[in-house]
Image (cartoon, rainbow, N blue to C red):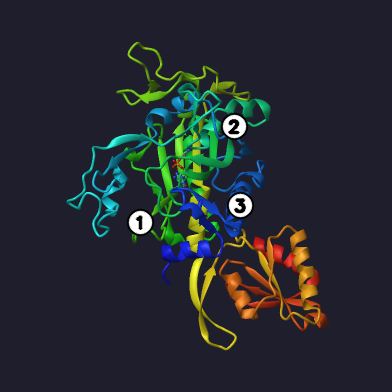
Amino acid sequence: MTRSMEKIVALCKRRGFIFQNSEIYGGQNGFWDYGPLGTELKRNVRDVWYHDMVSAHNELQQPAGAPSTFQMVGLESALIMHPQVWKCSGHYDLFHDMMVDCHACKGRFRQDHIPNTPCPQKPSKMVGEHTGCQLTEPREFNLMMKTILGALGTEEDAAFLRPETAQGIFVNFKNVCDSTRVKLPFGICQVGKSFRNEITPRNFTFRSREFEQMEIEFFCHPSQSREWYTYWRDRRYNWYLNLGIAKDRIILRDHHQDELAHYSVGTADIEYAFPFLSEGEFGELEGVAHRGDFDLRSHTEGKLTKNAAGELEVEKNADGTPKHRGSGKDLTYFDDQTRERFLPHVIEPSAGADRGTLAFICEAYHEDQQPDEKGEMQERILMKFHPRLAPVKAAVFPLIKKEGMPEKAAEIFGELKVAGLNCQYDQQGAIGRRYRRQDEIGTPFCITVDGDTAKDNCVTVRDRDSLQQDRVPVSRIVDEIVSRLKA
Ligand code: GAP
């Protein structure tokens, strides 16, 4: 079975998972739209993340591997923030890629991607290999998207769409501490859109200009930060395994010292073997970073930089004034048990909702051969989504369109809907074709009302993966599906 990207992209369009944005106008590069099934799938990815990280988190119980109990709360900050946020965070000066133009083909490339980018004019060669390429010197290109606020539209009114959700959490750290009874250690979680003016958006939704992040900023005492870093790194890796990603297609990769961001004490990436990569290559799904006190300190003191001794200090202009002034607000935490005041350290598990969704789609894609009604082998496409992520949880079929079967099937469909399960009702075509339509969108269970239902008040539940069929009483069908979805 080949998991080719072409087949996956075609399925996403054919069945309404992901569409090219503004397709009828030729498309908008770097932007994607989710169709009805993609919307359900991505919503499930977000909801499962929020459920597992926040709603279902029990602050009274110490999870396995955690140094202690802890609290988790949610936050939703605006897409646009005060421009000073990005100056102090370092994004204004440092959030750029090196860009190279080619005078010959008018192509624009990220410098670090050039060795692997096919030449648009000679796709058998890489950019730069082909003697006709006329490449410019690399230039810096800031990735933040600019917009203008208000009617005057002057440069002073310029603002940026956030390139990460994290800063919304840091600038609200004090608000959360003051308005709730959270005690260290605790995490603040946010799911939301981020924007980056990527020079070369590519590989389907993997690198887009508008995407969604699911970020946790976990605040802890500096003396415990290494233990928390290890805890979050392992927990987040296991989250993907528990949702069905195969162990040989996902890795936890610790960054080398020279790869670390300017603020980071340690970072690990959770990476997935996306089908658009070469054999043995992995692409980032999520980064788990130990950020020390960099963020809270910069929002107090101003933009930080490393001095010759490798210590962080406020970056200064030639006249000794801070290059970018901080808020001046005290963002320390006071521990009323130990009477200690300090700047917490931060562990940041930062996941991409779109990349996660794409990985779950790629992982789910399977092809096999199944006999049709006449016993002839037919190719079947099967999306093996984890039941928690599957966009459609169950499909209900009357075997034939008479003898009261459609009425009974509609009744069951209604009960599943009342229970909040996204289901489909289908009475068109042969039963085998109906199963195949559901297999192709990853519906875990198909429920069939047949000729025996009127006699024994039972329906058949077919499992997508094992193909096993069980008789289940109609009176228990909702509970049965709900419990199978949780298994
Ligand atoms: N606050 C830290 C941060 O934003 P990042 O590694 O730049 O770290 C975190 O981004 C995650 O966001 C990535 O692991 C990826 O899943 C997602 N992401 C980043 N840029 C993206 C893009 N252009 N398109 C889709 N997802 C992206």
Outermost residue on the top side: it is 319
Q: In this view, does 427 lie to the left or right of 310?
A: right
Residue at 61% over, 38% down = 70
Query: What whole-number distance in Å separates the C-alpha atoms at marks 1 and 3?
Result: 28 Å
Q: Determine crowd level at label 3: few under 14, some 14-19, many 20+ residues with C-alpha closer than 10 A.
A: some
Could you say whether the residue bearing mark 2 is in a helix, strand or loop? loop
Residue 358 appears at what percent x and percent y? 49, 56
Q: Quadrant of the C terminus?
A: bottom right
Residue at 38% over, 54% down = 282
Write down the residue under mark 1.
Answer: 281
Residue 30 appears at what percent x and percent y? 44, 48
Write down the residue under mark 3.
Answer: 43
Q: Determine crowd level at label 1: few under 14, some 14-19, many 20+ residues with C-alpha closer than 10 A.
A: few
Q: Which of 67 and 111 is in front in this view?
A: 111
Image quadrant where residue 413 sits: bottom right
Please identify, in this view, whether the residue under mark 1 or under mark 2 is nearer the observer. Answer: 1
Write down the residue under mark 2.
Answer: 184
Outermost residue on the front side: it is 25
Mark 2 belongs to which amino acid?
Answer: Leu
Q: Which of 52 and 393 is in front in this view?
A: 393
Q: Is residue 160 visible?
A: yes
Question: Which is more N-terminal, label 2 or label 3?
Answer: 3
Query: What whole-number distance in Å separates the C-alpha atoms at marks 3 and 2?
Result: 30 Å
Relative to residue 260, is residue 246 depicted above or below? below
Q: Determine crowd level at label 2: few under 14, some 14-19, many 20+ residues with C-alpha closer than 10 A.
A: some
Residue at 25% over, 57% down = 122
Relative to residue 371, is residue 341 depicted above or below? above
Label at residue 303: none
Q: In which quarter of the image is the N terminus?
A: bottom left
Tell me whether circle 1 and circle 2 mark residues in contact (CB < 8 Å): no
